[in-house]
Amino acid sequence: MSARLDTYNVIGNREALTNTIADLFADETPLFSMAKKKRATGVLHEWQEDTLASASKAGAIEGATVVYAKTGVRARLKNPTQIRIRPWEVTFTQEAVTTAGIKSSVARELMKAMKALATDFEKIFQSTAATTDGTSASGRTAKGLSKAITTNVVSKAGVSTFLDEDDIGRILQKIWNQGGNPNVLFCGGQSKRQISETFSAKTGFSFNIDQGARKMISNINSYEGSFGTLSVMPSRQIRPEKISIVQSDMLRVPVLRDIQQYKGAQTASSFKGWVEGEMTFEWGNQKAHGKYSGATTAGTVS
């Protein structure tokens, strides 16, 4: 008696592998993308900062003899270029076989390496890392934005409290007192929720779009404080307990070697390569920016 044909006893059925790949690439780079690119000419990038003398209300007498005073000296700042490399390798056989969802494994690995390198630089530029000059045995490292900001700071480090709207106002006032005009706020996911759900001076969107279905949009893209409006930009690469408030036209990315792909030496039956870039971060005058430390990084928004 012949057996009934069904999917349990037929061995020739092709697997149901879709030609779609569910990519989960956290490849947004808000700071890296925002900062204006410029050419770096050496491994140690330098720039200058300057400030005005304090305002005075003193009057001058008629016919006064002018007393000359030494003006403030410009400060010279520096940040070394940092090299990042992302290698990849695909065997000849893997490139030759038919692969679901992609036409070329080599092209896909190259694309992923490019995206990974961009997020590396975002993390470097957002970081609390200090500069190191490097040696023949260790790489140079660039100072990140969070480390560079030292004047306009509100810290709850060791306390770990919910982000408070008043603290953002205090930072903005500190920046304003120094002469800055901030327009962007970088934050992590928990702080983005805190701003969206609890801050009062928000100017993004929070309104019912279908009263019958009770649907609501609550996505705060900007915050209007006492000293201007800030674009609220969440970043996956900023430390979640920190917030940076910046004047965006001060930010630069000096590029010594732009991100490029390179072909590896043929030493085995595989395609090899890597992507590499060398650049640094220029924050302008750090007094134009501010930061908050110690925000709660998880839990119920309160």
Image (spheres, helix red, strand yellow):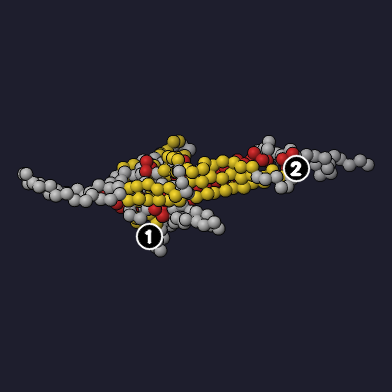
**Residue 80 position (above or below residue 101):** below
- The residue lying toward the viewer, choosing from 120 and 300, is 120
Quadrant in the rendering for residue 90: top right
- The residue lying toward the viewer, choosing from 42 and 86, is 42
The residue indicated by pointer 2 is 93
Kindly identify the residue that appears in the image at 43 percent across and 51 percent down.
79
Q: Could you tell me residue 38's position as x and y percent?
A: 44, 40
Q: CA distance from mark 1 to mark 2?
A: 55 Å
Going from the N terminus, do you reach mark 1 or mark 2 first? 2
Kindly identify the residue that appears in the image at 34 percent across and 42 percent down.
229
**Residue kind at label 1, given as amino acid type:** Lys
Of the 4 image quadrants, the one containing the C terminus is bottom left
Determine crowd level at label 2: few under 14, some 14-19, many 20+ residues with C-alpha closer than 10 A: few
Q: Could you tell me residue 174's position as x and y percent?
A: 29, 51
Of the 4 image quadrants, the one containing the N terminus is top right
Q: Give the numbered dot on residue 156.
A: 1
Kindly identify the residue that appears in the image at 55 percent across and 58 percent down.
137
* SS under mark 2: helix
**Residue kind at label 2, given as amino acid type:** Thr
Kindly identify the residue that appears in the image at 64 percent across and 42 percent down.
263
* SS under mark 1: loop
Q: Could you tell me residue 11's position as x and y percent?
A: 83, 42
Whether residue 87 is visible:
yes
In this view, the mark in front (1 or 2): 2
Whether residue 188 is visible:
no
- The residue lying toward the viewer, choosing from 52 and 180, is 52
